[in-house]
Amino acid sequence: MSVAVAARVGELRPSQLLWSFGIGAVVDLPNFSVMVLGLNDWDEGHTQQITEERLLAAVHRVLGPQVKKLAAPPMPPESDRPIDPTGEEARIGVPVVVFPEWFRCPVCQLLAPIGTRLFEFKENPYRPDLARYIHSGCPRARGPTAIPARFLVACERGHVDDFPWTYYVHRGGAACRGTLTFYEVGASLETANLFVKCNECDKSRSMIDAFDRDAHALPRCRGRHPHLRESKPSCPMPLRAILLGASNSWFPETRTVLSIPTHGEKLEQLLDENWSILEAATSLEVLRGFRAIGQLREFAGFSDNEIWAGIESKRAESNGPAADDRRELDLKRPEWEVLSAPDDALNSKDFMLTPTDKPSRYTHEIAAVVLAERLREVSALVGFTRIRSSGESSVGDIPIRRAALSIETAPKWLPATEVRGEGIFVRFDLERLGAWSEEGTQQERRKMLRAAHESWRSARQMDHVLEGFPDLVYVLLHSFSHALMRELTLECGYSAPSIRERIYASKAEEPIDMAGVLVYTAAPDSEGTLGGLVALGRPKDLGRLLDQALERATLCSSDPLCSEHDPRRDGTLHGAACHACLFAPETSCENGNRYLDRSTLVPTFRRANTGFFRTALP
């Protein structure tokens, strides 16, 4: 996918624009950095609508009903011929702006913003990766490539700005406007050895002061949103110095659902799958035109009148006065219901379930295993935060202000992606799980994790510190999912970051009526993945993998420290878990490696009688 503003300067995958380099994020290019602009600058005409009613309903609850559609980022039209780098097609893409605007000459150490015209942009339409800024007036070399300044400032309301170099070196709003120099001293590049100096008044200052929160070295936040080209000076939040490319500079807030069939009738399923096209059919004549040009071949068994009647019925239902109110608030509950009761009549090109036998050794713990041979996952970006992750909101309401994606606080559409793949769904025995949850040996573990949860929320000044604890059953399911994903990675052919999880668990303090794990992988290709994961869901293979996963979980290479870990001491949200045993890549875990504890699965070095699978171990 092209990333372009006045010139094409690079490429990104569509999924990266949701999870890594979305709106408001800084993208590191070979010779400088850019920030992805807001939706007001995107070319909506080259986007392709993505239909998923459940996700759109979830977006409405977050941003309001004015969001009319979800769409893939703008892309050039598919063609067998190469794109002319000087033509209009090369300029179709996601708009960006240069950020940070302060650059440094690596030869003479000059530090200045590009607005001073001391640095000159050099474009190469045939090699976008060679686009760069040069210091044409450098007294020591001939046009060396300038590099972006390494430091930025941000606040918890999503604002980000260039580092206030002039203010910082003069320790306030001095009248001196001399040129600046950034240089290093000593052998190491630690912050204490980095200095900025004013060439006019000869003042200098170490960068170590910028990271001292008690030194008050930074000015008030200017309320700047470079991705929206605006500033709101009323921001009361303190600024924090961050490094260019730091992981806390941008956290996406997304909503994700699995596309599940909501109707057993073939016509209704086809209407759902093709609604992005059928929605534009304003009359029976338009519908006939669509069929005449071959756009609706899947409807070959239905007449025009039958299809039109279905369109009118669906449109009336979606435009009803309480359409959103009738939808299920819990995004996972409908998925659980469909996965728990596979029905051949609901299978389609994007959703196919096949029940299989469960491993013989785990018949008491596992109620059913279902092979999800086809899955479709749709995700939408609803906003982003800085400094603190909005992903923490999965454990309760957190006062983190989400930054907007457009100048209007209520956008009309949102960027989204869809991927297709396969997975294995494991449903736990609810009766056995309920009995395990009430065992006396579990109460101590539950008490410890709940206390850690409350302490963690209190330390972050969150409201209702007693709320949001997912309970021990969720910890068990989450730990099981991570242990299984680790084993699948070794045999299925997919990398660890490409395997994901969805945990289906009842809320704390409610009856246990939902307990399952979906481990799946997906790819942006229209055909999905190749079946390597589903093949391991058969009873013999899955049983062997579970044996291995649980055996590895009993002993960690970090024991006894891992098994004896108490989250109340270090402010974490996991028990016996670490990078050596249960932690998974960020793209795989739905909860940031929180609420994990392998002692809920099997006996460990520290606890011998708390594991759910302790009687099933080989």
Image (tube, grey):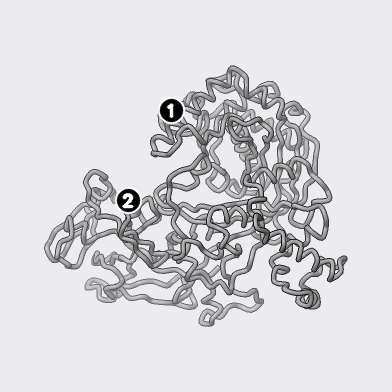
Viewer-side residue, 573 vs 393: 393
Secondary structure beneath disc 2?
Answer: loop
Task: Name the side, left or right, on which 616 lies relative to 248.
Answer: right
Q: Amino acid at mark 2?
A: Met
Instruction: Bin the neighbour count of mark 1 within 10 Å (Cα to Cα): few under 14, some 14-19, many 20 and up.
Output: some
Mark 2 lies on residue:
237
The residue positioned 28% from the left and 75% from the top of the image is 117
Mark 1 or mark 2, which is nearer the start of the sequence? 2
Viewer-side residue, 273 vs 441: 273
Residue 541, quarter of picture: top right
CB-based contact (under 8 Å), mark 2 and mark 1: no
Q: Amino acid at mark 1?
A: Arg
Viewer-side residue, 593 vs 394: 394
Mark 1 lies on residue:
568
Q: Position of residue 204 (x, y in %)?
A: 16, 56
Q: Position of residue 319 (x, y in %)?
A: 67, 61
